[in-house]
Amino acid sequence: MLVAVVGSGPSGFYAVEALLKSGLEVRVNLIEKLPAPFGLVRYGVAPDHPKLKQVSLVFHKIAQHPHVQFYGNVELGQDVSLSDLQETHHAVVLCYGAERDRRLGIAGEDLPGSHTATEFVAWYNGHPAYRDSSFDLSSRAAVIVGHGNVAADVCRILAKPVEALRQTDIAKHALEALAESRVREIHLVGRRGPAQAKFTSKELRELGELPDCVATVEGDSLRLGPEDETELAEKTNDNAAKCYQIFKQLGRSGDGSARRRIHFHFLLSPLSLNGKGRLESLTFTRNSLVGSAFEQHAEATKETIDIACGLCFRSIGYRGEPLPDVPFEERRGVVPNEAGRVRQGLYVSGWIKRGPSGIIGTNRADSVETIATLLGDVQHLGKDGASSKASFAGLVSAKRLHPISYDQWRLIDSAETQQGEKSGKPREKITSVDQMLAIAG
Amino acid sequence: MPHIVTDNCQDCRFTDCVGTCPVDCFHGDQERLYIDPDLCIDCGACIEACPVRAIFDVADMPDEHRKWIVVNAEKALLLPVIDAKQTPKSTAETRKVALGF
């Protein structure tokens, strides 16, 4: 059986692994739009979290299996169509993630100085599509809207002394810009309360322990309502309980001599981004929580507050991109599916399947489920082996595409590590696709 | 700081954690599971996967569980890798209730 897996991030690699473990005679073409594999492990995981990136060693092993062929620099929707893939494979598994940011849908969202967190993350991680982005770090105050781990990453990169980033694989352009940063006050704003923040306790704790930086909670927002108490008492909600304890331990005013300060704000929803020609402040509505435990939602009160800032990052979640001829659930930004099946022969896994939640390992269980569904359909997918299908390699060469094989990626990989060695970094990412292709030969 | 399986796993062995481990660092016998601290990348996916919250990040585990750090390291060396979910022990549901979950 020939299977195309589209996207080489965690969900894509774990889909390949599950196919290889199925015991069937399977060949997999792993299709990636960039010349480099690993998706958000390379372009999402923060540079100062190197241990998480070690998961790429597992992906490396999977990619080298003789039944796996990596096609980097081949983009679904641009270079090949879904029907191209279906004509050349018995099944297609879409693992292309959720790359679009959710929008706030309020006035001033596109003012200069207002950005998505994704754009910033992709920029400091050296993503080729974002190498030319620029962020005005000359502002003293920055606001991050959202209380999840991406918001925490953005906050940490802004708050950390640049010296602590020099030995990481952060992009050179980002390191240079951060070295000149004048950002001193970072406001992390969430629409619900401290019991509902979506940080993992580990990420939150890090924010309280940064050198030369103080994290404080604004106002008296740590008071809990009876529903919050119920939520935090639930034994399986232990992450929220841990986070709440961490919030309580943060200083109210803290060390006045610290160079940078992180302010946690709760129960605020952005109403508008304001400024003449560029961002000068955000206006928020104060919320109160309404509803029963675990179903509390934020409801606006009449009170508003302003926070002055020249820089804002919106980190309120991601959405997938729809594809032609594939159903799409607009509200959640996912491809509707049943245990991974969109229809017979077409499957999804990872963020495009379940939405942008969970951590690296979550995708393994998710892909195992999808591949189990695919294997259950196997008698309908054509067990006639490769011969009944046109060759994908033939199609790629007929279209005069320039695919990057895994061996070619390894040339890019070693060029990056060699370049990094010169400056004491684990790697210096090559941020230009043309340059990557030139190295790949 | 790796993650550690503590004694809530004993008599449960739900093995939901194994399916979420990105690096196959779980080892086990018929009794319970252990984490290889040298392989664990601290992603934390297993913590929430465990129905009885047997797994802790060493960085924030209660003192009474610290004795399991050494046991995990030692047992992981000796026992085979468990890389797919298995049937929980017959005592699992009773034990889960007894543990208050």
Image: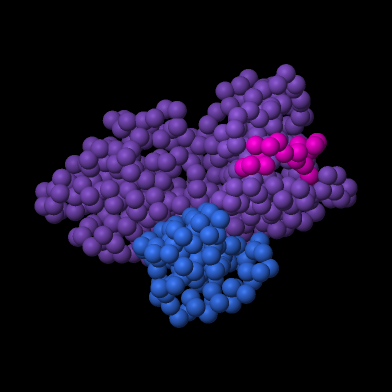
Chain colours: A purple, B blue
Name the foreground residue: A236 vs A123. Answer: A236
Name the foreground residue: A344 vs A170. Answer: A344
Q: Residue A39: horizontal and vertical position, in percent? A: 45, 50
Count of residue discs = 0
- What residue do we see at 72% from left, 18% from top? A302
Q: Residue A222: horizontal and vertical position, in percent? A: 75, 40
The question of residue A221 being in magenta is answered with yes
Above or below — where is A269 with respect to A260?
above
**Res. A107 in view:** yes
The question of residue A219 being in magenta is answered with yes
Name the foreground residue: A270 vs B63. Answer: B63
Q: Residue A109: horizontal and vertical position, in percent? A: 62, 25
Name the foreground residue: A419 vs A342. Answer: A342
Please state if A145 lies on the left or on the right of A411 as rendered: right
Segment tinted magenta in the rendering: A216-231
The quadrant the C terminus of chain A occupies is bottom left
Above or below — where is A188 with respect to B5?
above
Please state if A353 lies on the left or on the right of A299 as rendered: left
| Residue farthest to the right, as pictured | A256
